[in-house]
Amino acid sequence: MSTVEVLQATWQTLLVLFLCLAVTLPTGIFLALLIFRTDAVGRLMALVMVSSQIAVPLYAIAAGWNAGFGIQGWLTGMGWVPLEWFSAAGMTADWQRVAAVGAIHALAGIPWAVLMIGLGSLSTPLSAQWQAACDGGPWHVCRYVLLPQLRPWIALAALWCAVSVTTEMVISNLYQVTTLPELIYLDATRGGLRARTYGTGIVAACGLWLLLLGVRRLFLPDKAPATHRFCWAPGQTIGLGKWRPWWSLAMWLVVLPLIGLPLVSLVIKAGWQPVTHPEGAMHYQWDLHRFVTTLRETCYNFGPEYAWSMQLAGASSLLALGLAVVLHGIVARRWQWLVGALVLGLLAVPGPLVGITITHLLNRAQPAWCGWLYDHTLAAPILAQQFRLLPLAWLGTLVVLSSLGNQGWEQARLDGLSRWQMWSRWILPVAGRRFLAIGILLAVFSIGELSCTILVLPPGVTTLSMRLFEMLHFGMRHQDSGLSGVLVLLGWIAVYALGKTLIGRNAPSS
């Protein structure tokens, strides 16, 4: 890894991040304000559709858009989206790949931005909103009340995009764009690890960790958790008046293509096949028999991949949730901000660097049990996935505990319950279903996670994420669409379970 390679990778990483933020933040702010703070038509359905994407892995999102707009996409094949458009616009092949990577990261970041900014908008004091509404109407409220108070949450959404771009290598590897995590991954696969590899990853991780530490008050408030203020109150809704149909139309013109187009493309691509006429001409069309065949192949041709993914997901999610619960239970309140910052800092470590670290930790001759665990068990990928699952489990546990309310905590202290008694007699019986929903969400994240585990999977072990990642390098085919659809469906199930148990009672009416 030369200095020139590092500088080029840094430049391309910053370029991808800029493109990602340029799309994610304006779209996230627009949708968050319309869905969370106005009476737009169908905002509950829009929230459900947007939220359904948070557990869908990056490469599944890329597969959905490639099924329509890629070289082998059905829209491209029909001639409706000619690839010559990009060349006519002056974009070289390198710029097209960089733009594609930035676009996929943006599409994955928009749902998170909508939820973060939308929840932040609910904490605005009603008195300030009412005063601004009396002074100048809805636009006055947005400009002088909501947007200024949303700056920390917008920064948090931007930080989430930065974490994704600087730690994930699956999309940059898919489109052959050398970002910093991709450079670390390439260096590891070449078998020539050097000190500069570790230095590059550590510098990137430390920079993001400092940013995470700077916004820790959004995660770990000093007083009662801020999630108590996140409730849907009628007084918080801004009436759009005569402009309601037009703003609602604008919202759906963004939501439907954002969520619906890749799903439709996957369904069409799963049944897309060539048809030859007797005179020799050939064209493509959707065929129901081909679609059913794709579904059958998806269910029956990947049995080992399903089995390995389920085993890894069960063990990793259980370990992450258990560690999060233990940390919340044993760490004193005055030290929780430090433990939370360290746990959240795990998100900032580039995925390939995680794999390299786990390899050096377990792939050794002495003691012999370390090498046995590395070669014959799932210990290495389970440990690697904790860098992604443990921070999410920590945040999920924090939200569940804060949802119990201050009165319950005060009553438990008055009754003289110890920490173990609080968990066994009160927290788990009351919030058991919420922890189960978080466990399901973590399991789905584990099934889709690849960047940390790609370097440490034992011999003979192939997960769904690894299989689909390998297949996507050879184009977009029928089985690729089927496996991508499975991951999207799992993401829907996880988000539905979480929303039903944790925030379903506070959902807004359309």
Image (cartoon, helix red, strand yellow):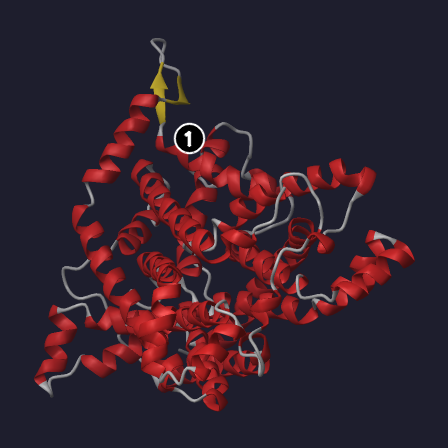
Q: Residue at x 81, y 58 (%)?
A: 141
Q: Nearer the viewer, residue 167 or 95?
A: 167
Q: Residue at x 13, y 71 (%)?
A: 375
Report which quarter residue 379 is drawn in: bottom left
Disc 1 residue type (three-letter): Ile
Give the quarter of the figure containing the C terminus: top right
Q: Which residue is mark 1?
A: 268
Above/below status of 337 relative to 41: below
Question: In the rendered view, does 388 fall on the left or right side of 244?
Answer: left
Q: Residue at x 14, y 81 (%)?
A: 370
Above/below status of 330 relative to 102: below
Instruction: Return the residue found at the far front.
Output: 415
Above/below status of 447 relative to 346: above
Question: In the rendered view, does 214 fall on the left or right side of 367?
Answer: right
Q: Residue at x 14, y 75 (%)?
A: 373
Report which quarter residue 275 is drawn in: top left
Give the quarter of the figure containing the N terminus: bottom left
Q: Nearer the viewer, residue 299 or 103?
A: 299
